């Protein structure tokens, strides 16, 4: 009788411990699946944002030389196409939440340069010629940060921890 009680109790105890361990592993597995699905969504949004930045970089990577032998970037090839220029800039800046803080700062710097110096009376072609070197340097910085970010794009937790919410509102500079 004692042997039967010992066998039954050890069977029940081992079944109970086994169920607890199995349940714990199942719960941890579901938590990991949830986290991975969440990180996958973050990665998809970041990829979309970085594709917009790539389009911006590509549009200022190609140079055109005017009849006066002064270069300017293809983005500024039409004096009166403000909508296209701002559409490309907006595409990159609208997804700022998913960009690294450094890359967003550079896109914002380009946006402010265009806002401040590309006026209707100057035109985009002349603006592009006058600011060719500044824009080329900004593009190079953007490419370097873009490449750096691509190395860690998959690391969603590190990205989320690196975001520093700040009040980036500032008065727009007066147009010249």
Image (spheres, rainbow, N blue to C red):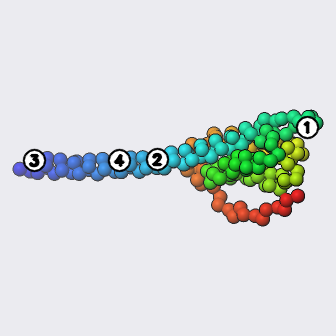
Marks 3 & 4, CB-CB < 8 Å contact: no
The x and y percentages for residue 16 are 23, 51
Where residue 37 is drawn, which disc sits there? 2
Q: Give the CA distance from mark 1 to mark 2.
A: 50 Å
Q: Give the CA distance from mark 2 to mark 4.
A: 18 Å
Classed neighbour count for the residue bearing mark 1: other residues with Cα under 10 Å, few (<14), some (14–19), many (≥20): some
* Residue placed under numbered mark 1 in the picture: 70
Marks 1 & 2, CB-CB < 8 Å contact: no
Which element carries disc 1, helix, strand or loop?
Answer: loop
Front label number (3 vs 4): 4
Q: Nearer the viewer, residue 65 or 98?
A: 65
For residue 19, side relative to residue 2 (left or right): right
Which element carries disc 2, helix, strand or loop?
Answer: helix
Front label number (3 vs 2): 2
Marks 3 & 2, CB-CB < 8 Å contact: no
Classed neighbour count for the residue bearing mark 2: other residues with Cα under 10 Å, few (<14), some (14–19), many (≥20): few
Q: Quadrant of residue 143?
A: top right
The x and y percentages for residue 62 are 78, 35
Counting residues from the N terminus, which is met first, the one under dot 4 or under dot 1?
4
Counting residues from the N terminus, which is met first, the one under dot 1 or under dot 3?
3
* Residue placed under numbered mark 3 in the picture: 3
The extreme left residue here reads: 1
Q: Give the CA distance from mark 1 to mark 3.
A: 98 Å
Q: Nearer the viewer, residue 116 or 6?
A: 116
Q: Quadrant of the C terminus?
A: bottom right
């Amino acid at each position: 009788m004692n042997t039967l009680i010992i066998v039954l109790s050890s069977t029940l105890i081992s079944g109970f411990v086994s169920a607890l361990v199995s349940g714990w592993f199942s719960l941890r597995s579901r938590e990991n699946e949830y986290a991975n699905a969440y990180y996958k969504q973050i990665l998809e949004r970041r990829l979309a944002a970085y594709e917009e930045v790539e389009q911006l970089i590509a549009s200022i990577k190609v140079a055109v030389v005017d009849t006066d032998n002064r270069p300017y970037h293809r983005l500024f090839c039409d004096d009166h196409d403000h909508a296209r220029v701002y559409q490309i800039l907006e595409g990159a800046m609208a997804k700022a939440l998913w960009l690294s803080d450094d890359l967003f700062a550079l896109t914002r710097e380009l946006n402010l340069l265009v806002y401040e110096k590309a006026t209707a009376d100057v035109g985009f072609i002349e603006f592009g010629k006058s600011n060719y070197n500044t824009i080329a340097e900004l593009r190079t910085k953007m490419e370097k940060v873009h490449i750096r970010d691509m190395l860690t794009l998959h690391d969603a937790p590190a990205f989320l921890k690196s975001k520093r919410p700040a009040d980036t509102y500032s008065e727009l500079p007066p147009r010249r």
